[in-house]
Structure formats: structure tokens, C-alpha cells
Image (spheres, rainbow, N blue to C red):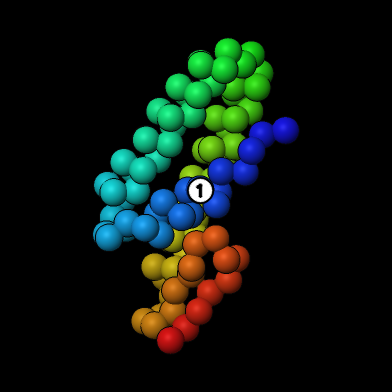
Amino acid sequence: MARDYYPLIARAIAGLDEKTAEARGVVYDHARTVLVGQLRDANHGLSIGLKELDALEEAIRKAESELSESEGRPDGCHITLGTNGDACT
């Protein structure tokens, strides 16, 4: 079973000073590069590698979806990545 990369991605995005698409893209590209390197070093089979990469891409899609939802909310409302909830101040 593939790992859940969402908590890792959510923490990385939450730690960005500016959560621009460009900054998030750098985080996502870095995560992909690290994962591919780990899969190569561990000499996992293609099937396992593809499942792990798919799990990472799913985590990225989920993070982007939550961020796009929060952009459409009224001022003062936001989604905190990784909490499955939102907050209005």
C-alpha cells in the first residue's frame, strides 16, 4: 500500500512565506525528485514505484484543491491544510 503523502505536502505548503503557484510548484517538484531518488536507491519494482508516485500526485491534487476552495471563500475564511476543516476569523 502506498504512503499518504498529504500530511507532508500540507506541512511544506503551510511553511511557505508566500503560497504562490510558483512556490508551491517548487515544493511539488522537490517532493517528486526526492521520491524518485528514494525509489531508485531502494530498487523497488516498477509497480510499487508507480503506486508511490501516484499517491504523491494525489496528495498534490488534494492540496491544490483545498487551496483553490479557500481562494473562493469570503474574506476572513480560510482552509488550514491538513485539518479537513476551515476557519473564519
Q: Whole-percent x and y of residue 35?
A: 49, 29
- Rendered position, 66 above or below 59: below
Q: Which residue is mark 1?
A: 8
Residue drawn at point x = 48 percent, y = 69 percent: 79
Q: Whole-percent x and y of residue 71?
A: 39, 68
Residue drawn at point x = 54 percent, y = 21 percent: 39
Residue drawn at point x = 48 percent, y = 54 percent: 10
| Kind of residue at badge 1 | Leu
Q: Quadrant of residue 42?
A: top right
> Helix, strand, or loop for circle 1?
helix
| 10 Å crowding of disc 1: few (<14), some (14-19), many (20+) | some
Quarter the C terminus occupies: bottom left
- Rendered position, 76 above or below 86: below
Quarter the N terminus occupies: top right
Q: Quadrant of residue 14?
A: bottom left
- Rendered position, 8 above or below 39: below
The residue closer to the viewer here, 73 or 40, is 40
Q: Image check: 46 left or right of 1?
A: left
Q: Whole-percent x and y of residue 26?
A: 31, 41
Residue drawn at point x = 59 percent, y = 22 percent: 49
Residue farthest toward the right in the current orientation of the protein: 1
